[in-house]
Image: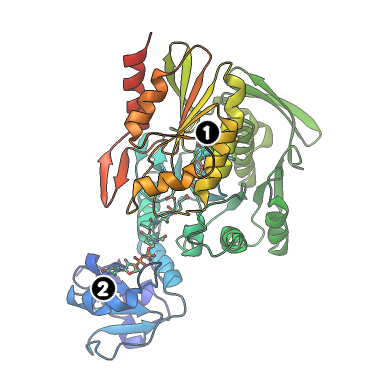
């Protein structure tokens, strides 16, 4: 059998005799165990993996790693190790199975802007002459294209398989998103990081994290994953920047502060120029002016964090800043799709309160007519976001239409009703295609319509099925139909 020595995958976890046993691979889902695998039982959000140990053995597992004691009915021939943290053991084993990683890896955390920053950092690395990739919500991206994955921070086995493949293809620089789930579940603990960044903290995922403090603590775990002395980039203009900086200082990480209050890259001026902006940045007693071909104060912050991450890995400050002028926006993030009757349509991924507020505030000056917003909230996610997003849309848009996002296992009408409680100004059209068509149809010269929440997504999750659905395609179809 080609495979691995158990002791090489899980050093010091198995007795000497078991350590020399050959295993075929590692699995954390009993249903995916193939013969001669080692099964790692994880305590999850819905189930305790330890319940599936016998199922894993039934599928051919020859060894088990678990947080609990050896089950009495486990056959004698099956090797067993009890460990304090099975998720950590899994992450380290994944890194042992797939040993190659790009030489320089940086990770960004925060409630909003991670995908943009990861992609911008990839683009800056590329502009500076490196073979670069990014990993996150939009998948694994290289200069050759994207390979879509479903999680923002993939599970450790998928993550390290991607790293190994990318390193083999010559990728030397990689920027990844560190989601709070990913950090909490130790998905990144086997990653050899060079630097990290903290963007912001707003309301999200309080269905998973018991409190905002614990949500913040999960994000700040990123600093613990960095080697001693590795720099961290912090957007100083955002709430919780001080908490992030304090934790970084305690862990001995030098800080690269960016933004108006940034000490390393100081945003001195930010002038709007159509759908671009010109940033004047102070650093090391110099001033540099650079065009950012994207809209929004928050995109300027994202771009400076990306430049900060390049600088954190040793790149030249001026060269990293200059690379901002070539940035291309991420699909479905403030993306201009087209016009009908002089009204413009933008597709965006805002699916949490702060993002929706930032997007509507950013787009307001571009609407000389009405600002129209079509949005919804995902099912099986933080319910507390719903009335907050409803209130923001009602306050900041002239017309706000509540529609379905990904209802998942929930009743879509109930989700909409929870959003609608926020304001009598909210309109409701459940079917997303119908809602988008109705909004495009009402466009007049000077209006701006933002379709928020699904960005780049290519499907709508209803129950346990994902039906093909793309805001881009639906908008384009409606635009061609209603163009005057
Ligand atoms: C809530 C959550 O994060 N769940 C993730 C977690 O699953 P879990 O460990 O909680 O799973 P569980 O269902 O409780 O089961 C426990 C264990 O028993 C195992 N099991 C289960 C059934 C069985 O028959 N046999 C078996 O062995 C499961 O494989 C699992 O190992 O670990 C799994 C492997 O890494 C993930 O696939 C899964 O993501 C689910 C699908 C998910 O939707 N996650 C979302 C919320 C998420 O992670 N989002 C973040 C943030 C997004 C952002 O805002 O940027 C992301 O990084 O994408
Ligand atoms: N720095 C920011 N501050 C506030 N809102 C932002 C910021 N950057 C992006 N946004 C908004 O959040 C949306 C999502 O952006 P992006 O995908 O870059 O963030 P993310 O953190 O990766 O999100 P997710 O957690 O869903 O993967 C954007 O479409 C935009 O509406
Ligand atoms: N990574 C986020 C994506 C949410 C996208 C939104 N369209 C929704 O379905 O709520 C999450 O899993 O919570
Ligand atoms: Mg993302």
Q: Is mark 2 within 8 Å of ligand 1?
A: no
Mark 1 vs mark 2: give the one in front: 1
Asked if residue 137 lies left or right of residue 211, the reply is left
Q: Quadrant of the N terminus?
A: bottom left
Q: Are marks 1 and 2 in contact (CB under 8 Å)?
A: no
Secondary structure beneath dot 2 equals strand
Q: What residue is pinned by disc 1?
A: 425
Alpha carbon of mark 1 to alpha carbon of mark 2: how far?
61 Å
Rendered view: 382 above or below 376: below
Residue assigned mark 2: 23
Can I make out residue 388 in this image? Answer: yes
* Direction from residue 296 to residue 17 in the image, left or right: left
Name the colour scheme: rainbow
Can the viewer see residue 378? Answer: no
Crowdedness near tag 2: few (<14), some (14–19) or many (≥20) residues, C-alpha within 10 Å: many
Query: Residue 33: x percent and y percent?
Result: 23, 68
| Label 1 within 8 A of ligand 2 by Cβ | no
- Residue 21: quarter of image: bottom left
The residue shown at (54%, 55%) is 193
Quarter that holds the C terminus: top left
Tag 1's secondary structure? loop
Q: Nearer the viewer, residue 56 or 447?
A: 447
Q: Position of residue 110 (x, y in %)?
A: 57, 49
Q: Which mark is residue 173?
A: none
- The percent coordinates of residue 280 (x first, y second) are 72, 27
């Amino acid at each position: 059998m080609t495979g691995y020595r158990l002791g090489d995958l899980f050093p010091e976890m198995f007795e000497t005799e078991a350590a020399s046993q050959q295993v075929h691979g590692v699995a954390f889902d009993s249903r995916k165990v193939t013969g001669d695998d080692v099964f790692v039982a994880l305590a999850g959000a819905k189930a305790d993996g330890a319940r599936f140990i016998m199922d894993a053995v039934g599928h051919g597992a020859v060894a088990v790693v678990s947080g609990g004691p050896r089950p009495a009915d486990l056959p004698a021939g099956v090797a067993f190790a009890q460990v304090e943290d099975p998720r950590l053991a899994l992450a380290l084993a994944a890194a042992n199975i797939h040993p190659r990683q790009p030489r320089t890896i940086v990770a960004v955390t925060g409630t909003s802007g991670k995908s943009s920053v990861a992609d911008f950092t990839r683009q800056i690395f590329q502009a500076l002459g490196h073979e670069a990739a990014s990993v996150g919500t939009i998948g694994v991206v290289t200069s050759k294209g994207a390979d879509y994955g479903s999680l923002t921070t993939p599970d450790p086995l998928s993550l390290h398989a991607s790293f190994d493949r990318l390193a083999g293809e010559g990728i030397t620089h990689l920027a990844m998103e560190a989601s709070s789930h990913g950090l909490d579940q130790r998905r990144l603990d086997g990653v050899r990081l060079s630097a990290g960044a903290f963007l912001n903290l707003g309301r999200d995922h309080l269905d998973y994290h018991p409190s905002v403090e614990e949500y913040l603590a999960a994000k700040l775990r990123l600093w613990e994953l960095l080697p001693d002395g590795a720099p961290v980039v912090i957007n100083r203009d955002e709430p919780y920047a001080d908490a992030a900086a304090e934790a970084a200082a305690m862990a001995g990480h030098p800080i690269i502060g960016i933004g108006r209050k940034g000490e390393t890259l100081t945003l001195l001026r930010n002038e709007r120029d159509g759908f671009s902006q010109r940033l004047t940045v102070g650093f090391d007693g110099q001033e540099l002016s650079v065009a950012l071909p994207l809209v929004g104060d928050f995109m300027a912050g994202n771009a400076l964090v990306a430049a900060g991450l390049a600088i954190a890995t040793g790149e030249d400050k001026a060269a990293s800043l200059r690379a901002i002028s070539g940035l291309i926006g991420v699909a479905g993030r403030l993306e201009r799709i087209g016009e009908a009757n002089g009204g413009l349509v933008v597709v965006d991924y805002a699916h949490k309160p702060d993002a929706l507020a930032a997007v509507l505030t950013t787009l307001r000056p571009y609407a000389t007519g009405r600002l129209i917003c079509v949005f919804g909230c995902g099912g099986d996610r933080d319910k507390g976001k719903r009335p907050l997003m409803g209130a923001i849309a009602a306050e900041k848009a002239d017309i706000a239409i509540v529609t379905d996002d990904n209802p998942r296992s929930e009743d879509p009408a109930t989700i909409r009703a929870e959003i609608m409680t926020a304001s009598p100004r909210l309109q409701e059209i459940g079917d997303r295609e119908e809602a988008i068509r109705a909004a495009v149809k009402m466009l007049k010269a000077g209006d701006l319509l933002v379709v928020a929440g699904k960005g780049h997504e290519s499907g709508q999750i209803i129950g346990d099925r994902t039906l093909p659905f793309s805001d881009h395609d639906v908008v384009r179809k409606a635009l061609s139909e209603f163009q005057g």
